[in-house]
Image (cartoon, helix red, strand yellow):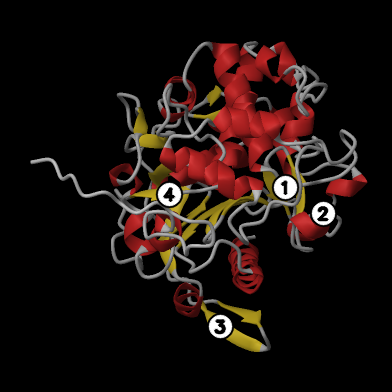
Amino acid sequence: MTSTTQQPAVQAGDPPSWWDRRSDLVMRRPFNEFTFTHMNWLMPTERVARGPAVRPLIAAPEPLDLTYRFDDRDLSLADLHRRTFTTAFVVLHRGAIVHECYPGMFAGPHTRMQLFSLSKSVTSVLIGIALAEGAIGSVKDQVTDYRRDFAGTAYDGTTLADLLDMTSGVGDLETWDGTDSAIRRFERAVLSGGDVAAIIRSVPRTGPIGERFNYSTFDAQVLGWVLEAATGRSLAAYASERLWSRIGAERDAYYGLTRSHPRTAIGAGAFNATARDLARVGRLMADDGVAGGHRLLSAEWVRRSRGTDLPHLAVGALGASGYDHYGYANQWWTLGESCFHAFTGLGVHGQYLFVDPAADVVIVKCSAWACEDDEARDRETITALRRIADHFA
């Protein structure tokens, strides 16, 4: 039966409707503990299939009764999970699971977690594989070598290296405040069927290429599109064939897609995977790009992800786009020599893939923070993860 009731037109100045605010509502506590583990119920997806052979992670559990020092207090890992809303936590040492817990209400070893911008680090891994295989020629290639539709936009003249280091000079400070920032318009287009590519093509240049860091979801999204153009494969298909099937993943992963057609993967922020399988990605990086005895990434690509000598990407030099305990390189957040060249992937609401090659430690922490960014919780988390790595080092 079709209703003929007319909905009143939305007038300028009207408060946003529930539908307009749905992305805010599903991201807030306590709802987000459910939504972050069921994103395939909320948006279109494409499967990242695992391979026929699962490579088991050896279980070698040991109690981690250590404490970390934060805010002039000695705190335990139980305190960390309570204070930072941990949903999944996996620690590998020398490739074995030494600690694993799932404090989240809907989380478990087989639960696929929404990783948000940690997806950018996965995209970096895929770019590295494409370079190793020759599908992409060089990080000095320009965006327009692969995507001619970006000719004449602010991305004309930028290289893949510029995108990888987020030094394209395109766009303003990325902020989730308000409703009309570029990233909010991008989010609405993803969820409501708008033209995502048109939004990114319209973003203006705000600085010279290669001279300053400006955190940019758009840079990472363009990288995903470049990868698809270079390989002739969707992001999910390429990830399945070249990464997921080769690291011995236990479970299929998936990418969230736009509602508009043709659908496109949100490579900058909608990869979903189990904590254990994400730890396998970290293990690949800790092992200099080798998985199961096969080299997937060049050792140079992994080193590029651990840090750079560019002064504007050094720890403490990122400016308003990054906290002062981070540097940046190759779609990863770096922590500097004081942490043995450890580095981490990050996603909003508290998603981490922490890799310390010197300690041979990989840590996955998924969370359900109430807001996108929280500097205090981030600083506490990094303090705790460093303490764990130091314990094993």
Task: Tell me which numbered mark, 1 or 3, is placed earlier along the sequence.
Answer: 3
Residue toward you, 28 or 278:
28
Residue at 43 percent of width and 20 percent of height = 241
Give percent across and percent down for residue 167.
Answer: 81, 38
Left or right: residue 132 versus residue 169 is left
- Tell me the CA gap for discs 3 and 4: 27 Å
Please identify, in this view, whether the residue under mark 1 or under mark 4 is nearer the observer.
1
As displayed, is residue 57 above or below residue 75? above
Amino acid marked by disc 4: Gln
Residue at 36 percent of width and 70 percent of height = 30
Q: Label 2, on which residue? A: 318
Q: Label 4, on which residue? A: 114
Please identify, in this view, whether the residue under mark 1 or under mark 3 is nearer the observer.
1
Q: Is residue 288 visible?
A: no
Quarter of the image for residue 392 reads: bottom right
Q: Check contact, mark 3 vs mark 4: CB within 8 A.
A: no
- Tell me the CA gap for discs 2 and 3: 29 Å
- Tell me the CA gap for discs 2 and 1: 9 Å
As displayed, is residue 268 above or below residue 38? above
Quarter of the image for residue 252 reads: top left
Which quarter of the image is occupied by the N terminus?
A: top left
Task: Tell me which numbered mark, 3 or 4, is placed earlier along the sequence.
Answer: 3
Q: Label 3, on which residue? A: 75
